[in-house]
Amino acid sequence: MYQKAKRKANSVCKAIRFWYLSLSLPFVMPKTLTSSRFKTLLLVLSLFFNLYILFFSHAPQFLISSYSSSSSSPTTRRHLLFAIASSSGSWPRRKPYLRLWYSPASTRAFAFLDREAPESAGDGSVAPVIISGDTSRFPYTVRGGLRSAIRVARVVKEVVDRGEPDVRWFVFGDDDTVFFVDNLVKTLSKYDHDRWYYIGSNSESYMQNVKYSFDMAFGGGGFAISHSLARVLATVFDSCLMRYGHLYGSDSRVFSCVAELGIGLTHEPGFHQVDMRGNLLGMLSAHPLSPLVSLHHLGAAEPIFPNMNNTQALEHLFQAMNADPARILQQTVCYDRTHSLTVSVAWGYAIQVHDGNELLPDLLSPQKTFMPWRRSRNVEASQYMFKMRDYPRDTCKRPTIFYLESLISNSHGISSNYTRHTVENCSKANAIKNLEHIRVISQKLELDVEEMKAPRRQCCTILGSSSNDSMTINIRRCRDDELISMNI
Ligand SMILES: *[C@@H]1O[C@H](CO)[C@@H](O)[C@H](O)[C@H]1NC(C)=O
Ligand SMILES: *[C@@H]1O[C@H](CO)[C@@H](O)[C@H](O)[C@H]1NC(C)=O
Ligand SMILES: *[C@@H]1O[C@H](CO)[C@@H](O)[C@H](O)[C@H]1NC(C)=O
Ligand SMILES: *[C@@H]1O[C@H](CO)[C@@H](O)[C@H](O)[C@H]1NC(C)=O
């Protein structure tokens, strides 16, 4: 209610501002205007003003009137409805991804398959399966493309048409999209679900964005559509699909139909399409300040922790995620001036210790540890949407890496342990040479919506160590004027 009133007040304010302008305009007009032109001008302006009042000030009300949800209560997990695009072929091997983030008690989700899969029924640990409707009447003309793109795009309509109650956001993803649900809830809380929003992220790959669009939410990274937009989109979706037989993917279709409704993408950097292969360390260790919302394509990358398979590695990451979702992968950098060390923590995942003073802005760029998604000779294929740091070929020149080993969470805070990943027998500075363990102490990161809108990186301190083989780091809020640098 409060928000509606505010919105109304806003449009009245705008109207008054407009009126004021139209009155004051004549006084700044050149003297050459005759008084009759003057009157005409006033007349025309007041006509515009009246039209404005008549149409535009009513528009927001018209948009709101058909929804009854109470906007003022905080958005929770139950307000999100996930629709996962899968197929009978991929479902059995992708179920482990869903088990990571889906829980029947707190998450609402459906998986859309082309037909029954061998193990699609009666498994409470994954989302209930729905068989998609027939799409044979829609055109598909991309040679070498997959017609299933239409079925997958149409999940947008099919999930809305189910008429599930109390949905504020419809969230779409693939069966190999891993969602970080609490962070997604927090991220979406920044936006008014009664407004029309299409929220997601483009590809990390420059070439992919050139090919599809810089302003398209890539489907594998997942995207969210506010219920108000989704309901309208569902009613026009089939007629819109008829125009886009020439498009390759499902996400292009959704993007096109949302665009036809006049809505553009709201970029949220926590969604990750992950159009890359190999070692994701560089990308995961330099996450933007926004909370991690999704990861995709992990089956094509190396397991994110050494000596584990993919599923185990993700389960390991989720242990940290469950203890402190908002902090997962968040990068904190601290300096040990005495030993000339720079320590970069990607919380819950890995710590990199550099010998010497590395400036903070340099550490915020991902290291190029990965390879492009598309194997191509084209130079553009290996260009990304961010500046990258070199990752030395000589393993001895790389920072020393410590991966998350274990963590304990209690009322005093969270203590996470990281152990050294030894690659080779390199000669390192004394301060690093014997370092085997790093312990990180932190408090659960609880951000309210206002803090989410203007996030600030946290600071850390390296606490005195009692032995040469371990180091303890305390992550904390920065002081107002604290600089993250070696010289404090
Ligand atoms: C990963 O390892 C676990 C435990 O050893 C095993 O149960 C699981 O089948 C493995 N997953 C894959 C995909 O190999
Ligand atoms: C972390 O390591 C320290 C020292 O190696 C140990 O005392 C502590 O119990 C470990 N904590 C966890 C959470 O494993
Ligand atoms: C590592 O290198 C040192 C000196 O180069 C050598 O003495 C030591 O045996 C090596 N250790 C291993 C495990 O290779
Ligand atoms: C740390 O290492 C130095 C020399 O490498 C040694 O003199 C000192 O005793 C060690 N300290 C501890 C606590 O092990």
Image: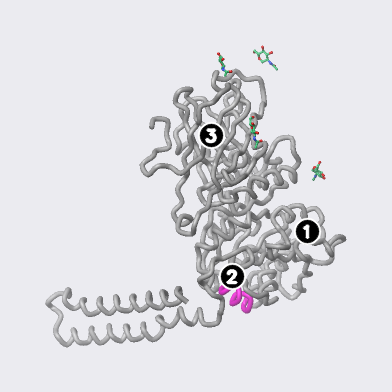
Which is nearer the eye, 103 or 44?
A: 103
Instruction: Residue at 30% x, 78% y: name it.
Output: 16
Viewer-closest of 93 and 142:
93
Q: Quadrant of ligand 2?
A: top right
Q: Secondary structure at mark 3?
A: strand
Height in image: 314 above or below 293? above
236 falls in the magenta region: yes
Any part of residue 262 in sight: no
Residue found at the far left of this picture: 31
Where are the magenta residues, as a range? 227-237
What residue is disc 3 on?
473
Mark 2, Cα crowd under 10 Å, few <14 / some 14-19 / many 20+, is many
Q: Nearer the viewer, residue 344 or 45?
A: 344
In the image, what residue type sits under mark 3?
Ile
Upstream in the sequence, badge 2 or badge 3? Answer: 2
- Disc with the residue nearer the chain's start (1 vs 3): 1
Q: Which residue is mark 2?
A: 168
Pointer 1 residue? 125
Label 1 is placed on what type of residue? Ser
Q: Which mark is residue 25?
A: none
In what element is the residue under mark 2? loop
